[in-house]
Amino acid sequence: MNWRFTIHDLRLTRPGNDCRACGNPGAPVLCPPGKRLSFQPRRSYGVAIRRNNFSNIFGALLMLLLFTGCRREMFQQASSRPLEKSEFFRDNRMASRPVVPNTVARGHLNDDDAFYTGKVGTNLVTEFPYPITREMLERGRQRFEIYCAPCHGRTGDGNGMIVQRGFPPPPSYHIDRLRTAPIGHFYDVITHGYGVMYPYAARVEPRDRWAIAAYIRALQLSRNISVTNLSADDLAKLNSQ
């Protein structure tokens, strides 16, 4: 009897899977006509996608459309180089626009010249812009030992550890020129630097600069104070020693 064999299942299977109809082994299994029952694999490497080709093509086209709207890198985005010329504005400046006149950055009003510059006009201030307290002096001592003592020394003699390593020595705070200098001078030097000393405006905030200046004045007074300026209690302690 002649049999006509047909492939009834296209799923990829391992050898050894049996047809549920006739028990013939194989992958895929060849069975006689009329026995086109479902094939149950024991194990499979994968399952073929049995879907409409139109839906697959539509999904692929949709993904292509989505990806064509994306930019790969930032260099494909609109940008301008610093000081690049453009005809968009009348002055032909595009990327680097000038600051609008009379505008102030948030938190940087700085409307008190004496406090923020140490000057009134072009003259250095001779008085502190706010009262000196013990807390202010303690803060000034702390900031002084962090930023100033490495060069000026803890007593202000100008023989700090950096100087001992070969850095040019700064002048002592106890010379007549600095003892009689207005207090605004120290604030101005801390802000803008002096000689080989670089500015500390970006490192020390204005209130701490005044605290450092107050501590420098305290160091000067500790070395050059007159006996007539001592109180009765301090004079008694001095005489007892």
Image (spheres, grey):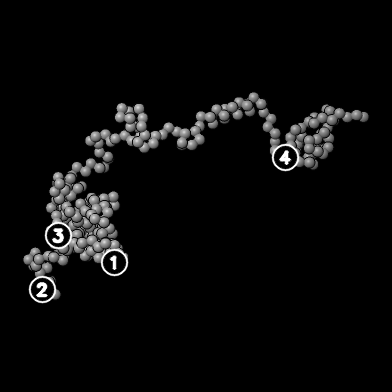
Between the residue at mark 2 and the residue at mark 4, the CA separation in whole angstroms equals 105 Å
Residue 222 in picture, x, y percent from top left? 16, 65
Quarter that holds the N terminus: top right
Secondary structure type for disc 4: loop
Sequence-earlier tag: 1 or 2? 1
Q: Which quadrant of the figure has residue 24? A: top right
Give the residue at mark 4.
44
Q: Are marks 2 and 4 in contact (CB under 8 Å)?
A: no
Residue 204 in picture, x, y percent from top left? 27, 52
Sequence-earlier tag: 4 or 1? 4
Sequence-earlier tag: 3 or 4? 4
Q: Which quadrant of the figure has residue 99? A: top left
**Number of dots carrying numbers:** 4
Give the residue at mark 3.
177
Q: Which amino acid lies under the numbered mark 3 shown in the image of this protein?
A: Arg
The correct choice, above or below, for 80 with respect to 231 in the image is above
Between the residue at mark 4 and the residue at mark 1, the CA separation in whole angstroms equals 81 Å
Q: In terms of depth relative to the viewer, which is nearer, 131 or 19?
A: 131
Say which residue appears at 76% left-offset and 32% top-offset: 9
Give the residue at mark 2.
239
Q: Which amino acid lies under the numbered mark 4 shown in the image of this protein?
A: Ser
Q: Which quadrant of the figure has residue 12? A: top right
Q: Which amino acid lies under the numbered mark 2 shown in the image of this protein?
A: Asn
Between the residue at mark 1 and the residue at mark 3, the CA separation in whole angstroms equals 24 Å
Using a 10 Å C-alpha cutoff, classify the residue at mark 2 as few (fewer than 14 neighbours), some (14 to 19) or many (20 or more): few
Sequence-earlier tag: 2 or 3? 3
Using a 10 Å C-alpha cutoff, classify the residue at mark 3 as few (fewer than 14 neighbours), some (14 to 19) or many (20 or more): few
Secondary structure type for disc 1: helix
Give the residue at mark 1.
164
Secondary structure type for disc 2: helix
